[in-house]
Amino acid sequence: MKKGLIIVVGLLLPALGWAAGGGPTFPNDSIDVNWDDKASMQRGARTFVNYCMGCHAAAYSRYNRVGADLGISDEQLLENLIFTTNKLGEQTKVGELMKINMNADYAEAAFGIAPPDLSLIARSRGVDWLYNYMRGFYVDESRPFGMNNGVFANVGMPHVLVELQGLQVPKKAMRPDGHGGEHEVIVGFDIVKPGSMSKSEYDNTIYDLVAFLDYVSEPYRQTRHNVGTGVIIFLFIFLILAYFLKKEYWKDIH
């Protein structure tokens, strides 16, 4: 597994990249995260710690809680998902929060703002936005990092997964702007330099990453749904019992 080379570069300028926005968006696909597919979330966790966690923490989660929920043993966590260390240089314990070694003061001095924690990003942005955003980077030499984004116009964040997706350029067309005129919008992409993954493989990787971030944003969701289902079943059974009990009590009157 890659531990530090790419994540040092990845997602370093969230102040620029996440504060821009606006304009027409492409791609604009929808996904449904399958919370029963723990293997998908495991793969997403691997992508997250290798490509995102050099700069972005998920500090509302603990490694061992993630492991317990996703079926990852402590040994597997230590070997494959925990690459941070404490002040003594010792590997982070499995019971600790998913924080990063980059401190806020250094990040602010180097990049203008500390990279945001991604624990709740799936709740604030939505899974569709994240899925499209991570697939929407394209070559734009006018931008500081040479990349723009079809979902987040004038993005200032580097494309951390470029070696997986490759380089793509936008296909544009004129569309009505709703005010009697037309404006240029992105309608597709052409790959000009292939990455290590095919388009379908990359899309699946991003789906897995988003699935993991969706889980991290609300780890109790599945439990809550299960409890809610149980309560509804209980109330339905109780309704039947109460109905027959009522009939028994009132049978002599009716």
Image (spheres, rainbow, N blue to C red):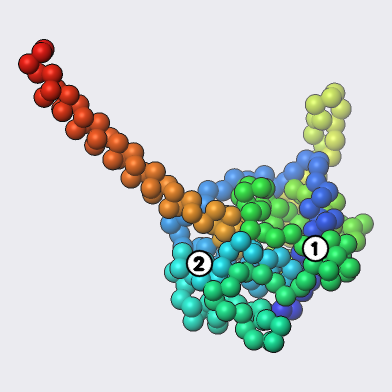
Q: Name the residue located 66 percent from the left edge and 70 percent from the top edge.
A: 99
Question: Which residue was labeled with disc 2?
Answer: 65
> Which residue reaches farthest left?
252
Residue 13, above or below 136: below
Q: Amino acid at mark 2?
A: Arg
Task: Identify the mark nearer the N-term, 2 or 1.
Answer: 2
Can see residue 103?
yes
Which one is nearer the viewer's eye here, 194 or 16? 16
> Which residue reaches farthest top?
254
Of the 4 image quadrants, the one containing the C terminus is top left
Q: Residues within 10 Å of mark 2 (few under 14, many from 20)?
A: some
Q: Name the residue located 63 percent from the left edge and 58 percent from the top edge.
A: 119
- Give the alpha-carbon distance from disc 2 to disc 1, as whole Å: 25 Å
- Image location of residue 243, percent across then percent down: 20, 26
Q: Which mark is residue 153?
A: none
Residue 155, above or below 95: above
Asked whether the residues under the numbered discs 2 and 1 touch, taking CB atoms below 8 Å apart as contact, a structural biologist would say no
Q: Amino acid at mark 1?
A: Ala
- Image location of residue 78, percent across then percent down: 55, 81
Question: Which residue was labeled with disc 1?
Answer: 114
Q: Secondary structure at mark 2?
A: helix
Total label count?
Answer: 2
Horizontal side, residue 208 vs residue 226: left or right: right
Q: Name the residue located 64 percent from the left edge and 63 percent from the top edge.
A: 58
Q: Secondary structure at mark 1?
A: loop
Of the 4 image quadrants, the one containing the N terminus is bottom right
Q: Name the residue located 28 percent from the left edge and 40 percent from the top edge.
A: 234
- Image location of residue 230, percent across then percent down: 33, 45
The answer to which image quadrant residue 93 occupies is bottom right
